[in-house]
Image (tube, grey):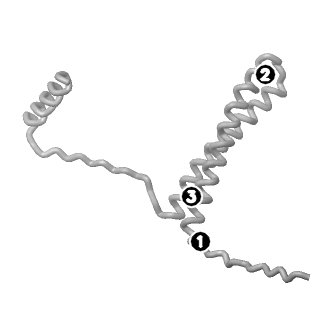
Amino acid sequence: MANNIITLVPKLPVPMEENLECDIARARMNILEATEIAQSGMVELGQLADQAQDSKMYDALSKMITTTVNANKELIELHRAKQDLTGQTQTVVQNNLYVGSTKDAIEMLKNRKKEETEE
């Protein structure tokens, strides 16, 4: 009898942030893929329902549309959940402040317009 020795290599712990990013990315890709498949199926099912004029096909089309809308809502919720978990927000605030007279502002706008027409 041969001695077969199996050595188990301990799995290194993956930081929570990496797991979270991978899971969110995977969930996002799954939702997007399901949405794309449903959209292409909706076109075909819509054509079939139109040709057959069958209420069951229209019902199936309605359910498929509802499922696609729900998948899109899940995608938005995924983004919100990521923001909640990571504390990241994507708000961009842009405040512009002009200090000068109205005469200077009008001249600046005229010069800008002139430069745009010359190009």
Foreground mark, 1 or 3?
A: 1
User: Can you identify the residue that label 3 sits on?
Assistant: 81
User: Can you identify the residue that label 2 sits on?
Assistant: 48
Check residue 14 in the rendering and tell me which mark sits there, or answer none: 1
N-term mark: 1 or 3:
1
104 displayed left or right of 66: left
N-term mark: 2 or 1:
1
Which residue is nearer to you in this view: 100 or 19?
A: 19
Circle 3 SS class: helix
71 displayed left or right of 93: right
Q: Is residue 2 above or below residue 39?
A: below
Circle 1 SS class: loop
Residue 42, position as x, y percentages in the image = 71, 30
Q: How many marks?
A: 3
Foreground mark, 2 or 3?
A: 2
Q: How many neighbours does mark 2 have within 10 angstroms: few (below 14), some (14-19), or many (20 or more)?
A: some
Residue shown at the point (43%, 53%) measured from the top left: 90
| Image quadrant containing the C terminus | top left
- Amino acid beneath label 2: Leu
Q: CA distance from mark 1 to mark 3?
A: 20 Å
Residue 98, position as x, y percentages in the image = 16, 44
Foreground mark, 2 or 1?
A: 1
Q: Residue furthest front?
A: 1
N-term mark: 2 or 3:
2
- Amino acid beneath label 3: Ala
